[in-house]
Image (cartoon, grey):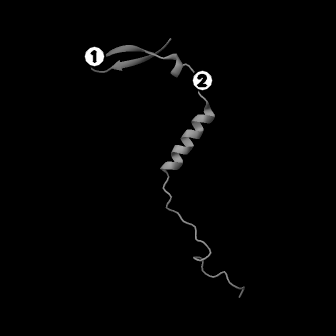
Amino acid sequence: MLTATCFDFATNKEQQFPLPESVFGVSPQVAVIHHVVTGYLAQRRRYTRQVKDRSQVRGGGRKP
């Protein structure tokens, strides 16, 4: 059985809490965690940059 230790600063006592094996007893899948974190950080990014298209670029005609 997995347990977590919680320290109460008001009473200076430690308490043990049981953790469910179905949630905390499995090994993590690094690929899934990486996919979730990458998606989260991509959504936080602000898309303020812009690339000019053909009509906005100056010049580009014949070679002088």
Q: How far across and down, in percent of the image, does residue 32 sit?
A: 60, 35
Relative image position of residue 48 (x, y in whole percent): 49, 61
Q: Secondary structure at mark 2?
A: loop
Residue 57: name its quadrant: bottom right
Is 42 positioned to the left or the right of 31 in the image? Answer: left
Q: Residue at x 50, y 52 (%)?
A: 45
Q: How many marks?
A: 2
Report the residue that reaches farthest toward the right.
Answer: 63
* Secondary structure type for disc 1: loop
Picture residue at 60% right of the left edge, 80% below the top: 58
In this view, the residue farthest toward the bottom is: 64
Which is more N-terminal, label 2 or label 1? Answer: 1
Q: What x and y, as percent, mark residue 8?
A: 32, 19
48 relative to 54 in the view: left or right: left
Q: Residues within 10 Å of mark 1 (few under 14, many from 20)?
A: few
The residue shown at (54%, 65%) is: 50
Residue type at the position of mark 2: Ser
Q: From the image, tell me which residue sits under label 2.
A: 27
Q: Amino acid at mark 1?
A: Thr
The residue closer to the viewer here, 54 or 4, is 54
Q: Which mark is residue 11?
A: 1
17 vs 59, left or right, is left
